[in-house]
Image: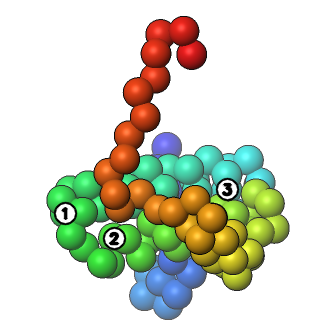
Amino acid sequence: MSKVKLIRDSLSSVIEPERLRTIKDKDEYTKLLKEKLTEEINELIETDYKSITEYADVIQVLYTMAEHFSDITIPDIERERLEKLMKRGGFSGGLVYSITEEE
């Protein structure tokens, strides 16, 4: 049995058509999106978090997942991200919270 891998839509023009198919099954598509996110995060880690291309790939997969799972759009995400940033800040300060065993 051959393994399948989710690829960017535009790559259909450079790959032999007999090696391509469109996923119709929602469960299979969900599984492949999760695998793609893991793959892209691992690639980002391998670059020691220095590749803008890998950040873009991770973000693209997250945007696709948001649309697929929840009909959440990119503007929705950006609006929420900026609102949260303004109200609660980001993570660039390195602030941590100590969690006790009782929590």
Residue beneath disc 2: 54
Residue beneath disc 3: 29
Whole-angstrom CA distance, mark 2 to mark 1, is 8 Å
Left or right, 85 with reference to 73:
left
Label 1 neighbourhood size at 10 Å, few (<14), some (14-19), many (20+)? few
Colour setup of the view: rainbow
Helix, strand or loop for disc 2: helix
Q: In the image, is residue 75 above or below residue 42?
A: below
User: Which quadrant is home to the C terminus?
Assistant: top right
Residues 102 and 69: in front is: 102
Helix, strand or loop for disc 1: loop
Residue beneath disc 1: 47
User: What's the amino acid at mark 2?
Assistant: Glu
Residue 26: % across, % down:
77, 54
Tell me if residue 77 can be seen: no
Check the image and name the residue furthest to the bottom. Answer: 13
Q: In the image, is residue 51 above or below residue 103?
A: below
Whole-angstrom CA distance, mark 3 to mark 1, is 27 Å
- Which of disc 1 and disc 3 is earlier in sequence? 3
Marks 2,1: beta carbons within 8 A: yes
User: What's the amino acid at mark 3?
Assistant: Tyr
Q: Residue at x 47, y 10 (%)?
A: 101
Helix, strand or loop for disc 3: helix
Marks 2,3: beta carbons within 8 A: no
Whole-angstrom CA distance, mark 2 to mark 3, is 21 Å
Left or right, 73 with reference to 42:
right
Residues 89 and 81: in front is: 89
